[in-house]
């Protein structure tokens, strides 16, 4: 009975072995987070969604959330399975004011990356940032 590969519950124990793959290139070509591809997606989504919108303070949070959801789906479709995505969307009214958005991150420079895009029309502006953080 001790030679049986089953535990007492009748369920076979699965043992995973380490792959020792510590970078995205180990999973094949085009698996590394490429800024230019994500930036193209950002430009396309912002142009489609913000171009004809007027700023509304009540709908601002909803617009930001929908943009972040759309961006997450489109960036995931690029095939970055080994990356955690952090998406930040800022929407505001354009009234001639000056504004700066700054971020700092602590990450692995060889595998992690980000893309950022800015779009504005006559009544509003939108800044989107997508961070791709590699995890093993």
Image (cartoon, helix red, strand yellow):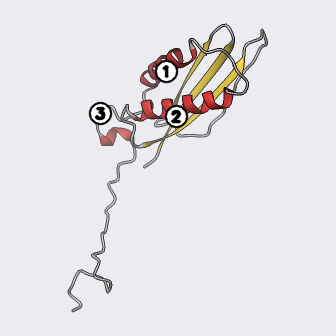
Indicate the secondary structure of the residue bearing disc 3.
loop
Q: Pointers 1 and 3 in contact (CB under 8 A)?
A: no
Q: Residue 100 or 89: which is nearer the viewer?
A: 89
| Quadrant of residue 34 within the rendered picture | top left
Residue that badge 1 annotates: 45
Residue 129 screen position, x and y as percent: 58, 28
**Percent of width and height locating residue 54:** 65, 14
First in sequence: mark 2 vs mark 1:
1
Q: Name the residue carrying label 3.
A: 29
> In this rendering, is residue 74 above or below 99?
below
Q: Mark 2: which secondary structure?
A: helix
At horizontal 38% and vertical 40% (from top left) the residue drawn is 24
- Determine the CA span between mark 1 and mark 3: 26 Å
Within 10 Å of disc 1 (Cα), the crowding (few <14, some 14-19, many 20+) is: some
The image position of residue 10, as x and y in percent, is 28, 82
Determine whether, in the image, residue 69 is placed left or right of residue 97.
left
Q: CA distance from mark 2 to mark 1?
A: 11 Å
Q: Is residue 41 left or right of residue 116?
A: left
The quarter holding residue 103 reads top right
Identify the residue at horizontal 40%, vertical 37% (top origin): 80
Q: Which mark is residue 69?
A: 2
**Horizontal placement of 80 versus 114: left or right?**
left
Residue 53: x percent and y percent?
A: 61, 15
Label 3 Cα neighbours within 10 Å, binned few <14 / some 14-19 / many ≥20: few
First in sequence: mark 1 or mark 3? 3
């Amino acid at each position: 009975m001790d030679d049986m590969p089953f535990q007492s519950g009748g369920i076979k124990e699965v043992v995973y072995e380490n792959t020792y793959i510590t970078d995205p290139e180990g999973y094949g070509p085009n698996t590394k987070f490429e800024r230019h591809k994500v930036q193209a997606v950002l430009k396309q989504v912002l142009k489609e969604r913000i171009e004809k919108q007027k700023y509304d303070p009540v709908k601002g949070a909803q617009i930001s959330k929908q943009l972040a959801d759309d961006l997450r789906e489109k960036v995931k479709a690029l095939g970055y399975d080994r990356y955690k995505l952090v998406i930040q969307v800022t929407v505001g009214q354009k009234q001639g004011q000056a504004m700066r958005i700054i971020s700092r991150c602590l990450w692995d420079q060889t595998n992690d990356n980000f893309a950022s895009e800015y779009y504005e029309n006559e009544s509003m502006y939108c800044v989107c940032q997508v961070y791709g953080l590699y995890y093993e």
